[in-house]
Every structure is written in C-alpha cells, then in structure tokens.
Image (spheres, rainbow, N blue to C red):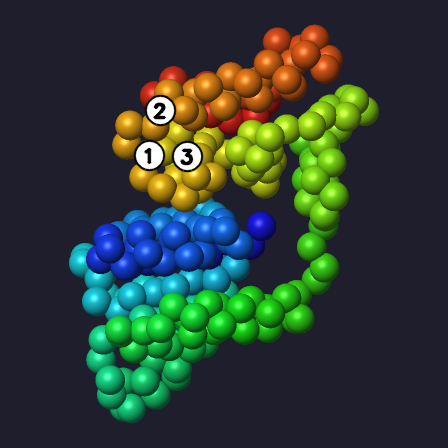
Amino acid sequence: MLKILLIEDHTDIQQLLRAVLSPQYQVLTALDGIKGLQVFSEQHPDLIILDLMLPNITGESVLKTIRKTSNVPVLVLTAIQSKTKTVALLTAGANDYLTKPFDIDELLARVQVQLRSTASTSPVENTTLAFNDIRLNLTTHQITVSDHALTLPKKEFQILQLLLKDPHQVFAKAQLYETVWGEPYQGAENTLNVHLSNLRIKLNALTGHSKYIVSVWGIGVRLV
C-alpha cells in the first residue's frame, strides 16, 4: 500500500483527509513541520501533502529540507491565493498545489496523478514482503509461514504487512493503530492488543516457535 504523509496542523482538516485517503493509502500524519520531517525520514512516504502555515517551522522550510535529499512528490495546501507565491512554491520544488478551501474530489485526483507519475518513473515494486520464514504476497494476499499457508482477517493482515515493510523497526502501538485503523489511538489499546495477541497465536501455531512478534517495553512491538 502506498504511503502518504499528511503534514497539517488543523486537526479537522487532518481527520477529514485521513478519512478520505485511508481506504486507498497508508496515511501517516504530523501536526507540525519538525514531526513531519521526522516521519518523512523514518517512513519514506510515496507522496507528501504539505500545509504551508505550520507551527515551529514553515511549510516552505519543510519543502526545502525535503528537496535536499528526495524527489518525493509534494502537494502543497495553501490559503494564499497569489500567483507570485505559487510560482515561488513550484520553483522551490513543489509538484502541485491546492488553495484552501479545496474540493475533496479534486484533491484525490491530484494525488492520483502525482502517484501515477511516480510509478511510471520508478522500478516495479517487489510484490512479496519477507522476513525470516514469513512471506506475504501483496498482489494475492497469500501468506506463508515456514511454507504453511496462513489466512488472516483484514486488520491482522494489515498489522503484519506494516511490520514486514520495515522488520527491524520498533513500531509504537499508537503508530500501528492509527495506520491500520485510520483513527486516533486514544482508548483503543485493548482493541490493538487483542489483534496482536491473535496474530501472535496464529503465527506461533504454524511452527511451534514461541516468538515472532515481541514487545519492546515502553516503546512498542517489532518482529524477531
């Protein structure tokens, strides 16, 4: 699933965009530029939707920093309707822009155009995620563990897929939940823990191993 990083400090807009994008994309979020740059460096998104009016550091500064190391498509959201400003943004490295208030259908169309352009110039993505004896096919959704077939419900599949995409990373539980469920983590710890427990049991049952997903105390979970 393609990743979109949404750097937007207005929570209402952030929640709206996450709701409309999450059915098709993995949506990562940040409420300020500093956090946005951190998520960008850790998660390597396929597209960034960037608000200009951000706390701590401006959207323009975020864009300049990103362009020092990456050509990832950046779609800018701005309340400033100025031709001079628009030209400056595009010159600084923005791929496209929308002025607020914007139409959701138009935003979705522009997102698709940018991701399609990226796909046409990028190597074909490997369709299989693998770590040790776990294999997950992104096209067929088939999973094997030590050559045993495994069928998972949607949320458990998405959790495993996320862990396999970066198997050496420790994922915070809030990050796991908000990425998979597309909603705030507050009050949802029990829901996530039940899904993680079910996933552990199913993985372990196929091989008799006692561990596949381990908890890192005070931080989150990772594969081993």
Q: Amino acid at mark 3?
A: Tyr
Structural distance between the alpha carbons of marks 2 and 3: 8 Å
Query: Does label 2 or label 3 sit earlier along the sequence?
Result: 3
- Where, quadrant-wise, is the C terminus in this rendering? top right
Q: Amino acid at mark 1?
A: Tyr
Q: Does the residue at mark 2 contact the one at mark 1 (Cβ under 8 Å)?
A: yes
Residue 103 appears left or right of 155: left
Q: Residue 185, labelled with which disc?
A: 1
Mark 1 Cα shell of 10 Å, populated few (<14), some (14-19), many (≥20): some
Expressed as whole percent of the image width and height from the top left, the position of residue 195 reads 50, 23
Q: Does the residue at mark 1 contact the one at mark 3 (Cβ under 8 Å)?
A: yes
**Which residue lies most toward the bottom here?**
83
Structural distance between the alpha carbons of marks 2 and 1: 7 Å
Question: Looking at the image, can residue 137 be seen?
Answer: yes
**Disc 3 designates what residue?**
177
Q: Residue at x 21, y 67 (%)?
A: 53
Question: Looking at the image, can residue 68 be seen?
Answer: no
Q: Residue at x 81, y 24 (%)?
A: 147
**Disc 2 designates what residue?**
189
Query: Does label 1 or label 3 sit earlier along the sequence?
Result: 3
Structural distance between the alpha carbons of marks 1 and 3: 6 Å
Q: Amino acid at mark 2?
A: Glu
Q: Residue 10, labelled with which disc?
A: none
Q: Nearer the viewer, residue 2 or 195?
A: 195
